[in-house]
Image: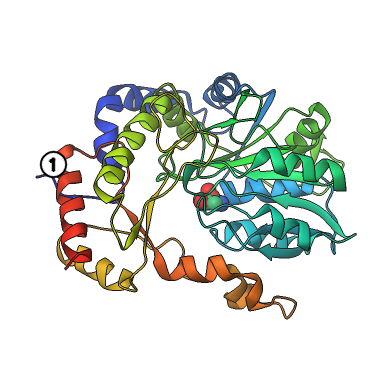
């Protein structure tokens, strides 16, 4: 059996090796490292794929979130509501811009932001909500859009983990994750579902004015060369990363299929087990269906409900199976983000999830032998 990895970027590289190597070689020959044609072409190709008017490439997903908030004109003291159970980048940029982060609990089935908890947290100072499409499926965007309209709030989607996912509205219409709110942000970190070979990110919007504002902001606030109208940043996707992403974008749907395939096999093995809760696809489709892209499984995350999650993680390590605990500490308990306004009673779900979650190897190259070894090892341990 091939060695099991949490993410197998080497295996994914092999079938696209020649294309990637030759486009990188061409960039080296032309010295078009920054703002080369690859970046512009990738931008157009991603706009087509997502069905969004504007893609603005930038240096990483964290920058994308920061720049989106700058572009919307959020001001110090404005409150921004986001999920307690996510990667810290989301809350970090809120705090960095001197906005006030307001963390709220998540839902136990989807791991995504709890709409009722958002409603309780809204005040007259609330200006934006940042739903994180955690582990590969969208937050409840229909409810979020309605809430945003009612309270005049911006929706900034943190789509770092769900590029390629579809969201299905109650009337059956589909839209790509990250293109539904006022602005969406993604990361091309190598282990993300659409990963570069270094850092990268992008911002999506259908709003022409916001796109214009953001295009200047990523480039030192310049709208005309050497005229700096606003305080901006330097945040660029480089041409070599764009070339890698161009090779991978046409394969993104098949990458999503491969992840969903692995997820389906995991779920077949783990559902109906007493001490295991399998991840649920909640976006108006039942389970992990074959015909939709509602969940793109950035992570496949189980809940181990008998208190033996940490013991399982150690056991898997001993058996040569990597795993991850995403995330071990709620953001409201992180030193950088503690706030006396928070009440433990407001975070029952996150506080429980951090004890129970474990993410199994998930990537495009898992084979049946590896999946069977992983599922057998987990089941033997949990049922022992
Ligand atoms: C990866 C990630 C980010 C940050 O992306 P970088 O490219 O690493 O800066 C932000 N939010 C979430 C949910 C992520 O998973």
Question: At which x and y percent is residue 92?
Answer: 64, 62
Toward which corner of the image does residue 96 lie, by quadrant?
bottom right
Nearest the viewer among 14 and 219 is 14
Nearest the viewer among 210 and 217 is 210
Question: At which x and y percent is residue 91?
Answer: 65, 61
The image shows residue 344, relative to residue 363, as above or below, that is below
Q: Residue furthest left?
A: 1
Question: At which x and y percent is residue 301?
Answer: 39, 53
**Quadrant assignment for the C terminus:** bottom left
The image shows residue 335, relative to residue 95, as above or below, that is below
Q: 10 Å neighbourhood of mark 1: few (<14), some, or many (≥20)? A: few
| Secondary structure type for disc 1 | helix
Toward which corner of the image does residue 85 lie, by quadrant?
bottom right
Q: Which residue is mark 1?
A: 369
Nearest the viewer among 115 and 295 is 115
Toward which corner of the image does residue 229 lie, by quadrant?
top right
Question: At which x and y percent is residue 10?
Answer: 26, 40
* Residue 186 in the figure: left or right of residue 306: right
The residue lying at 54 percent from left, 24 percent from top is: 42
Q: How has the structure been colored for display?
A: rainbow
Regarding residue 126, the answer to whether it shows in the image is yes
The residue lying at 46 percent from left, 27 percent from top is: 292
**Quadrant assignment for the N terminus:** top left
């Amino acid at each position: 059996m091939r060695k099991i990895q949490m993410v197998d970027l080497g295996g994914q590289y092999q079938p696209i090796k020649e294309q990637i190597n030759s486009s990188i070689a061409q960039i080296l020959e032309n010295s078009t490292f920054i703002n080369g044609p690859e970046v512009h072409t990738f931008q157009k190709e991603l706009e087509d794929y997502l069905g969004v008017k504007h893609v603005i490439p930038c240096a990483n997903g964290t920058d994308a979130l920061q720049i989106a908030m700058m572009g919307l004109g959020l001001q110090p003291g404005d409150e921004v509501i986001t999920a307690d159970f996510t990667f810290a980048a989301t809350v970090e940029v809120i705090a960095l811009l001197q906005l006030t982060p307001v963390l709220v609990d998540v839902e136990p089935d989807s791991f995504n932001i709890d709409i009722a908890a958002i409603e309780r947290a809204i005040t007259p100072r609330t200006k934006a909500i940042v739903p994180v499409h955690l582990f590969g499926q969208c937050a409840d965007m229909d409810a979020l859009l309605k809430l945003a309209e009612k309270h005049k709030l911006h929706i900034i989607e943190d789509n770092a983990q769900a590029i390629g996912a579809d969201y299905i509205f109650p009337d059956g219409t589909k839209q790509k994750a990250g293109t539904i709110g006022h602005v969406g942000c993604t990361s091309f970190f190598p282990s993300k579902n659409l990963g570069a070979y270094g850092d990268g990110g992008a911002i999506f919007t259908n709003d022409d004015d916001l796109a214009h504002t953001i295009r200047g902001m990523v480039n030192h606030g310049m709208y005309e060369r050497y005229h700096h109208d606003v305080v901006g940043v330097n945040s660029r996707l480089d041409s070599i990363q764009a070339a890698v992403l161009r090779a991978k974008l046409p394969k993104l749907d098949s990458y999503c299929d491969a992840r969903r395939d692995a997820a389906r096999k995991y779920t077949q093995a783990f559902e109906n087990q007493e001490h295991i809760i399998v991840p649920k696809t909640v976006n108006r489709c039942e389970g992990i269906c074959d015909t939709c892209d509602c969940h793109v499984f950035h992570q496949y995350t189980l809940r181990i409900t008998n208190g033996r999650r940490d013991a399982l993680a150690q056991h898997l390590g001993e058996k040569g199976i990597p795993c991850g605990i995403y995330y071990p500490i709620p953001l409201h308990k992180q030193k950088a983000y503690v706030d006396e306004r928070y009440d433990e009673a407001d975070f029952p779900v996150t506080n429980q999830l951090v004890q129970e979650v474990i993410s199994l190897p998930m990537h495009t190259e898992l084979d049946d032998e590896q999946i069977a070894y992983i599922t057998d090892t987990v089941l033997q341990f949990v049922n022992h």
